[in-house]
């Protein structure tokens, strides 16, 4: 029976994806045959686990005691005063153990891997946050752990490479192509194809083949659930607008999901505009990307007319990727989620502004959401509410930012 | 009879396995690649598997990744790949199949791509990352234009799926002999006869075996059981090893193909 909220937007967020992993024309399963059985086993195991109260209770326990949930909804008083418009709240996923929302999904998939009897875990990482989260849960649960990371990303996120190694993970550099997240995923998939029987692949975003986009989304849904409870407790009503950055889109879909049927809440995802929207200089898939298939799913992809994947650029390694999660593409078509982009120079400026005004150093990825959020706050009325998902902390970025700003450490 | 069916029938009549050779189209450049493919077809190769270079070949090992990179850097485009196939077809009646990734087929419309492939003289398409569940558009276009659809069966494919895959396959089944990516291995997988028996319980189609086969002895070992034997990386290595003197590539591959072809006979 449709609830009142369902009638509000005409959407049923739980109806997707279909059994084949499709969000309308997006998503699906596009992998080599060797992986088909592993994906269907994973899907079946997840179906059982998601309905198993013991699994969910154990996950909640680890999310609380190991990761530090729930995270605060923080009123950013000085950023609000600075903008002079809407009240700005920050959902503090940056306060989680290992520094970003990624730990939510890593814990969920690690418990699932243990249930499935896998002894070895692999992962890809861009900014290193998913790699660090995976390394942490592998240490905690005693899995062998291999993380693939592009050589360029290893350089700009050297601190995270060391953190992963400290926690016992093997970090393998990937030298192919442009040496960033896309190549790391290719290499992780090659590893998985080779070692599929004993290995679980903890994919770190709401991307890839079914069941990953759905499963990763579900493991991040508490971000939005907590936000809803917290804003109702604080303000007695829902926010007018919510903003999150979108690489693959896991923090954003987890943040938005609870609100998809709330017609009064505007939802905005922010992509990486890099050096500007010209070919090869950005990672804003909705600005010049077209429908295609990459690394397991059908979605918007930055590609040339022949279908070769384009180079991308962003100051933030975590958003530097040519494809966007399929569920985002679906809700964009339905005009339920809007998308904007923020460019490198604005990001660097806001990175410093937020640090200075709030005493919070945001991850470069999350700073994309802040850039757009501050613009929007200025346009909104003082009695309106804006919630920005601060998906990660910027400790990992300080070396890179110092370098860009010409500061010698 | 299609060119693919004819090639398998001819090999069977000669009591040997069909020899299927893989090269990446345009590796290391268009002219050298054309000469290399012609050298293969003149030296015992029954079926040419033409890899369409893709920026993100996630089912391929390093050898083929680098081959695709060389081809793309030399300026290969979709149009040039079709041109290469057309030039090969001018001088040969051997079947040519595209070994490709789905985004390249999808990018400008599946039907248009398949039609262009047919016009260029291509006989079949194998799309590495396209399982039967998602392949409706490709199989429909291929049926419409008379192009065979080759699908892969893996060691991890359960019996229940084999029939489903065979049902959408024409031309031949490609059995990937091991879990993993393409590339030469020291030993061929040990359980090939059992795997082929499992597949043949579901289909009359010829079954070719590939992945990890690189030497004449390995070809002979697999040819004893399979309808076709695929060699890829071992040939691509012949390109890689002669990049400094590209004139040597075609003769090197000619000799290597002749040697491997001699291994396809059955006792």
Image (cartoon, rainbow, N blue to C red):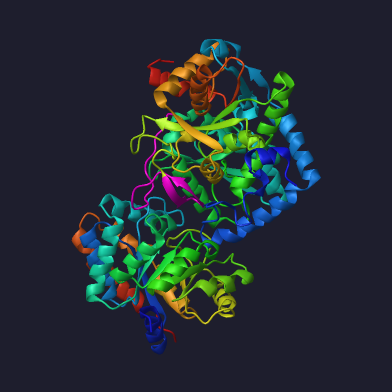
Residue A353 position, x and y percent, is 49, 14
A73, above or below A81, in the image: below
Q: Which one is in front, A5 or B122?
A: A5
Residue B114 visible, this angle: yes
Residue A368 position, x and y percent, is 49, 27
B182, above or below A269, in the image: below
What residue appears at the point 42 percent right and 70 percent down from the top-left corner?
B142
Q: Which one is in front, B267 or A99?
A: A99
The verdict on residue B14 being magenta is no
Which residue is farthest bottom?
A: B13
Please state, as top left, top right, bottom left or bottom right, where the C terminus of chain B lies in the image.
bottom left
Predominant secondary structure in magenta?
Answer: loop
A320, above or below B82, in the image: above
Number of numbered tags placed on the structure image: 0
Residue B148 visible, this angle: no
Residue A365 position, x and y percent, is 50, 29
What residue appears at the point 71 percent right and 52 percent down from the top-left corner?
A47
Residue A61 position, x and y percent, is 77, 35
In the image, is B85 to the left or to the right of A389? left
Which region shows up in magenta?
A290-315
In the image, is A347 to the left or to the right of A40? left
Please state, as top left, top right, bottom left or bottom right, where the N terminus of chain B lies in the image.
bottom left
């Amino acid at each position: 029976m449709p609830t009142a909220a369902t009638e509000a937007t005409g959407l049923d967020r739980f109806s997707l994806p279909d059994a084949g992993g499709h969000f309308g024309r997006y998503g699906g399963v596009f992998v080599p045959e060797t992986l088909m059985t592993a994906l269907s086993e994973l899907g079946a195991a997840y179906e059982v686990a998601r309905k198993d109260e013991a699994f969910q209770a154990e996950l909640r326990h680890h999310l609380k005691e190991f990761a530090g949930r729930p995270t605060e909804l923080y009123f950013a008083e000085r950023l609000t005063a600075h903008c002079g418009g809407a009240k700005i709240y920050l959902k503090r996923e940056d306060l989680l153990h290992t520094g970003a929302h990624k730990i939510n999904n890593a814990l969920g998939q690690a418990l699932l891997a243990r249930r499935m009897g896998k002894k070895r875990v692999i992962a890809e990482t861009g900014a290193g946050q998913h790699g660090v989260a995976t390394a942490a849960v592998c240490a905690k649960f005693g899995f062998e752990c291999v993380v693939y990371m592009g050589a360029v990303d290893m350089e700009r996120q050297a601190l995270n490479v060391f953190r992963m190694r400290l926690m016992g993970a093997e970090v393998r550099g990937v030298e192919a192509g442009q040496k960033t997240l896309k190549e790391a995923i290719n290499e992780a998939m090659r590893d998985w194809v080779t070692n599929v029987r004993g290995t679980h692949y903890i994919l770190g975003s709401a991307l890839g083949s079914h069941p990953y986009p759905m499963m990763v989304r579900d493991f991040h849904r508490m971000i939005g659930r907590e936000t809803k409870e917290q804003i109702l407790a604080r303000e007695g009503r829902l926010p007018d607008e919510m903003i999150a950055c979108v690489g693959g889109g896991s923090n954003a879909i987890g943040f938005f999901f609870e609100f998809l049927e709330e017609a009064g809440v505007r939802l905005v995802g922010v992509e990486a505009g890099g050096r500007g929207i010209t070919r090869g200089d950005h990672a804003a898939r909705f600005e010049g990307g077209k429908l295609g298939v990459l690394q397991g799913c059908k979605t918007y992809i930055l590609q040339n007319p022949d279908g070769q994947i384009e180079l991308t650029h962003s100051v933030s390694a975590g958003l530097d990727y040519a494809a966007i999660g399929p569920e985002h593409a679906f809700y964009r078509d339905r005009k339920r989620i809007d998308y904007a982009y923020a460019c490198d120079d604005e990001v660097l400026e806001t990175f410093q502004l937020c640090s200075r005004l709030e005493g919070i150093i945001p991850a470069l990825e999350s700073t994309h959401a802040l850039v757009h959020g501050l613009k929007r706050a200025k346009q909104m009325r003082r009695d309106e509410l804006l919630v920005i998902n601060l998906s990660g902390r910027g400790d990992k970025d300080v070396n890179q930012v110092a370098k860009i700003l010409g500061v010698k450490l | 009879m299609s060119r693919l069916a004819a090639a398998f029938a001819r090999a069977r009549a000669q009591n040997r396995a069909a020899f299927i050779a893989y090269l990446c189209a345009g590796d290391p450049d268009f002219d050298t690649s054309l000469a290399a493919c012609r050298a293969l077809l003149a030296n015992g190769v029954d079926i040419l598997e033409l890899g369409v270079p893709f920026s993100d070949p996630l089912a391929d090992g390093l050898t083929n990744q680098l081959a695709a990179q060389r081809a793309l850097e030399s300026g290969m485009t979709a149009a040039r790949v079709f041109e290469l196939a057309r030039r090969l077809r001018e001088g040969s009646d051997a079947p040519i199949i595209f070994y490709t990734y789905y985004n390249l087929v999808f990018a400008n419309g599946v039907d248009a791509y398949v039609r262009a492939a047919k016009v260029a003289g291509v006989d079949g398409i194998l799309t590495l990352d396209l399982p039967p569940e998602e392949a409706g558009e490709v199989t429909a276009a291929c049926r419409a234009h008379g192009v065979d659809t080759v699908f892969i069966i893996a060691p991890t494919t359960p019996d229940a799926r084999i029939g489903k895959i065979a049902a959408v396959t024409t031309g031949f089944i490609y059995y990937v002999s091991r879990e993993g990516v393409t590339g030469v291995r020291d030993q061929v997988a040990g359980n090939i006869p059992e795997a082929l028996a499992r597949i043949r319980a579901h289909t009359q189609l010829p079954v070719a075996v590939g992945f990890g086969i690189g030497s004449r002895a390995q070809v002979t070992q697999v040819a004893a059981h399979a309808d076709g034997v695929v060699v890829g990386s071992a040939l691509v290595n012949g390109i890689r090893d002669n990049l400094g003197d590209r004139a040597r590539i075609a003769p090197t591959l000619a000799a290597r193909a002749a040697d491997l072809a001699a291994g396809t006979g059955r006792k």
